[in-house]
């Protein structure tokens, strides 16, 4: 199986897992999955978030899933429990499709690390 096929298969597992659990089977898109990872990393599951907080949650998720790739490094938790990351290396300029593949690969790795998919 090629790497692309393997990524697609694993990505489909992530989408199904989260869509079944959080969207009554409606298919979640990449942004929704990034948001859910942010909520998971913050650990405040029953909160209502404002628009700017939702953007911050997505930023947390992006930093967390790209951390193993060497782009970000966890720094600290602030007084309200929000994680903060430092940029270690700037992301290379990527086309939209390439960004999507990088994020899907990073998210799949995150879910494998958490042992939620194989």
Image: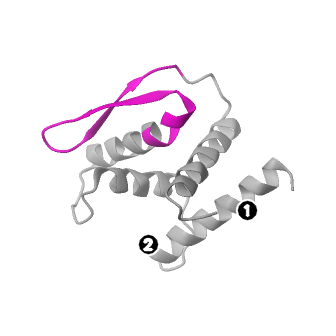
Split into 4 quadrants, where in the image is the C terminus?
A: bottom right
In the rendered structure, the answer to whether residue 58 lies left or right of residue 48 reads right
In the rendered structure, the answer to whether residue 109 lies left or right of residue 62 reads right
In the rendered structure, the answer to whether residue 8 lies left or right of residue 91 reads right
Dot 2, crowdedness within 10 Å: few (<14), some or many (≥20)? some
Q: Residue at position x 53%, y 27% from top? A: 70
Return the x and y of residue 72 as percentages of the image width and height.
Answer: 45, 29
Residues shaded magenta: 64-90
In the orientation shown, which residue stands out farthest toward the top?
89
Which label belongs to residue 92?
none
Q: Which residue is mark 2?
A: 22
Q: Which residue is mark 1?
A: 9
**Which mark's residue is nearer the viewer, 1 or 2?**
1
In the orientation shown, which residue stands out farthest toward the bottom?
24
Figure colour scheme: one colour
Closer to the camera in the image, 22 or 82: 82
Q: Would you say residue 87 sits in the magenta stretch?
A: yes
Q: Secondary structure at mark 1?
A: helix
Q: Would you say residue 112 sits in the magenta stretch?
A: no
Q: Residue at position x 28%, y 39% from top? A: 83
Q: Check the image and report above or below for 77 versus 111.
A: above
């Amino acid at each position: 199986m090629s790497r692309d096929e393997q990524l697609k298969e694993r990505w489909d597992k992530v989408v199904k897992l989260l869509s079944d659990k959080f969207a009554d089977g409606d298919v979640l898109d990449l942004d929704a999955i990034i948001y859910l990872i942010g909520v998971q990393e913050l650990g405040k599951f029953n909160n209502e978030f404002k628009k700017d907080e939702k953007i911050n949650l997505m930023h947390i998720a992006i930093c967390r899933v790209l951390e193993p790739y060497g782009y970000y490094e966890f720094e600290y938790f602030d007084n309200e429990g929000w994680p903060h990351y430092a940029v270690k290396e700037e992301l290379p300029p990527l086309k939209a499709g390439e960004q999507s593949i990088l994020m899907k690969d990073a998210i799949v790795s995150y879910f494998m690390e958490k042992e939620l998919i194989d």
